[in-house]
Image: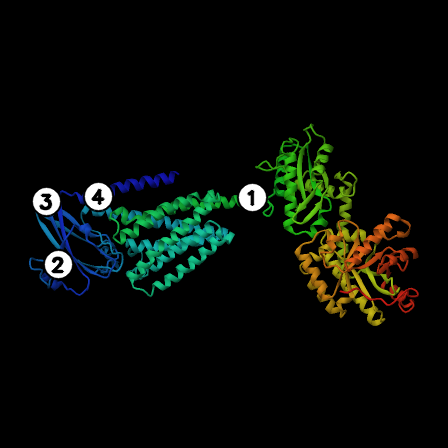
Amino acid sequence: MIILLLITFILVNVTSRLIAIDDKQISNQAFSVTSSYFIDQSNNIKLADINNQQQLFTPVALNEIPFELAKHTYWIKIQVANKTNQSLPLVLYADNSMLDVFDIYQPNKTYGIKQAPIHTDLLASEKGKYSLHKVYPHLAFDLRSKQSKEFLLKIETQGPPNVPLMVLNNDDFSQRMLYAQIFYGAFIGLAILMAMYNLVLFFAIKDKVYLVYIGYLLSAFFVLSSLTGFGYFIFSASVQAFINQYLLFIDYYLVIFLLVFTLLFLRYDQQNNKTYQIGLVLTALLGICSFYSLTLDTIAQTKLFFSIQPIFYFFALYMLLRRLHQDFSWAKYYLLSWVPLFIGAAIQPLVLLNYLEYSFITRNAFLFAILIELTLMAFALAERMKRNEKDRLNDITYHISSGLPRKSNIESFINQLIKQKNQDFKVLAIKPEHIEKVSLYIDDAILTELYQKLFYKLSSLFQFNDKVYALTEKGEKICLINNNALMIIIDIKQKQQSIDELIDAIQQTVADNYQIKSIKLPLSAVVGISVFSEQTKKSHQLINQALLAANNAESLHQKWSYFEDNSTKENTYFLQLTSELQSAIENNQLEVFHQAQIDLSTLRVCSSECLIRWNHPTQGYIPPTVFIPIAEDMGLINQLTLWVVKTALQQQYLISHDYGFNHMISINISGKDIASQHFFTQVIDIIEDSTISADKLIFELTESASFAYNEQSLSLLEKLVDLGITISIDDFGTGYSSMSQVSNLPFQELKVDRQFVENVNDDRKRKIIAEATVKMAKGLGLEVVAEGINSQADEDTLRSFGCDIGQGYYYAKPLAIDDYISWLENLDNGRIKQAVQGEFIPAEK
């Protein structure tokens, strides 16, 4: 504000002085000026003919000569009379640096036609220095007491048609030149500083808006250098003449850069909406017009440019006002910068085209406007940088997708408590139970919406609870950690509510059915707690311990637990096991076992389920229930699944080609496999390398994925089916699976879980559930597999329900490949015993 006030004070002071000079010229008592003019529209009249055209001269005030935007020759007679008793040093001055001809004759009474002009050749130079007459077309002369002088001026211009003519006292003329040079020098200095400043910002931030602004500065520099004539002080005469020739072409790019700058500065490029697209189209049209204008003469170029220029200025203003309407308050300086720009951009052409009265202020209105605009733009860019920094900090402290506070907030708060030697706090991690498995089957948008709903419900619970600390400047008390848990910090000095009561309130708040889009998610909360100690006094340690405690709480009845130190050893063991599992995969130290699947109609072996086994070199047999969850949690499950597929297909080749069994294989895949974007192509590569037909392959999707799905997973399943692979839903009847969801997914086989099959004949409820499940699946056209058949009675009962395939210890336990082939060879033509009816016919794929 101080800078703005200082600039305003200087401008007001200088303006008042210049107005005084202009008023002095109008009401001058020291000398008088009379004038008349004649316009040669044919441009053919010579100096010798002027004596015969005296009657065509029209008397008029010097500042009222009607210059037009046309290629005419103007002949002007000026008579200056000294009314004082002393000699006057005067200057006849034309305030237009773009004149093509400015010849001054001092005629005798008969206008001698051989008399040479006393001022001519606007580009005359001496020893490399260009005449000031090009920048300030003028003639200095002395007028003795009571003397009068008459001058004849010949003026031609294809540039701005306004040619302000005036007779000034020499001191006033010198003062006008001085002020003009000061203003232009200030513009040059400010433009250089702004260009360097923006260039540094561009290389530092890589934001193209600063580069575009440099383009705007350069365009403004060339335009003003040409209009004011000061370019002759910087460039050679030929270079400046070239700039003058293409001035209107440069004017187009002044507007283009301004338009693009507005789009980028106001971040329309990030929205890519209709306004942004219209802006790009208008920018392209301006570029086309700029090159089209080169085919026109100067007058046509001028008319075209000044007729379309307001359209683009008003569109840029519309973009600004539209953004401000959206509460883009940090653009206030940019809005203010448009005020002088619009005023200057409106006044300048009106003066140059002779539609507005000339004065030093109006003549240089655009220069003044650019000076003020550049100053305000410096503030606007600073505000933009400040806002960008604020946005950057916001990105650090808040998740972009959900808008929820990040982990960094809780880390900073814990560090602050520790720095203040405050150890009376606990860290609580709140997780929806089994959220890792649930997240496999819903897309990121649904998961984000879920956490947003949980965040707002829990925030309402904690709003007036002083036991829960506020973690952010906005007073938010919850942070989202690792996109799968919410976390709070409680003050244990506050005694109004016990930890048990608080957790109970959390669990009751979370225990609700969340309807998100078309999916209804039944949720319950698990809570993990970590406590500050001398061994655990780092923020990341407390956060990780709370998360580990929450994971452990899933297996407890009360669904919450404190972190215990002995779990550290367990975690170390799991990490070591993860490393050894990866090594086992890479070195083929795992095995694939086969458990036979029997067609219940023919009692023929039709397929086998491939089960992975790990015989650790030092620890012995490690159950899949131990290492498969580790593979899923540690990101190895996809690598493990692909190893099983590759190994199983190699063994299938052995079973079918080397031993001639008509046989299929069934392989378990994880939800994380179908969530992988490369899984499909990886499976295709393995199948092609194996030479096994895809229709001999069954994929059993574990964890009952039918309760929810996303578009990517559904698309992958459909592509696997199109490839010929049978898709089976495993362990049906557990978890979240439902028949309504199965009917919407491309499953062809349903596998009834063993808990509904074992001893099914002896348990009335189990029998009813198994029968209903089989008949519903058959009604949907699915092939049904029952696992866990352990007796003849189980087999007979499942067959009576219409079950297609049986699997269990009644037929065979899982066997290594060599043992499995030996078992197959000992069968009666591939049958377990005498067939009951018909031949095995696989379900349609």
- Between the residue at mark 3 and the residue at mark 2, the CA separation in whole angstroms equals 29 Å
Q: Which mark is residue 775?
A: none
Judge depth for marks 2 and 4 and give the one in front.
2
Residue 115 coordinates in the image, percent (x, y):
11, 62
* Amino acid type shown at disc 2: Leu
* Amino acid type shown at disc 4: Ile
- Between the residue at mark 1 and the residue at mark 2, the CA separation in whole angstroms equals 75 Å
Q: Quadrant of the C terminus?
A: bottom right
Query: Label 2 belongs to which residue?
Result: 56
Residue 641 horizontal side relative to residue 309, left or right:
right
Q: Earlier in the sequence, mark 1 or mark 2?
A: 2
Q: Are marks 3 and 4 in contact (CB under 8 Å)?
A: no
Q: Earlier in the sequence, mark 3 or mark 1?
A: 3
Residue 127 coordinates in the image, percent (x, y):
24, 60
Q: Residues within 10 Å of mark 4 (few under 14, many from 20)?
A: many
Judge depth for marks 1 and 2 and give the one in front.
2
- Between the residue at mark 3 and the residue at mark 4, the CA separation in whole angstroms equals 19 Å
**Callout 1: helix, strand or loop?**
helix
* Amino acid type shown at disc 3: Lys
Q: Which mark is residue 21?
A: 4
* Amino acid type shown at disc 1: Asn
Query: Label 3 belongs to which residue?
Result: 83
Residue 166 coordinates in the image, percent (x, y):
19, 50
**Callout 3: helix, strand or loop?**
loop
Q: Residues within 10 Å of mark 3 (few under 14, many from 20)?
A: some
Q: Are marks 1 and 2 in contact (CB under 8 Å)?
A: no
Q: Earlier in the sequence, mark 2 or mark 4?
A: 4
Residue 802 horizontal side relative to residue 42, left or right:
right
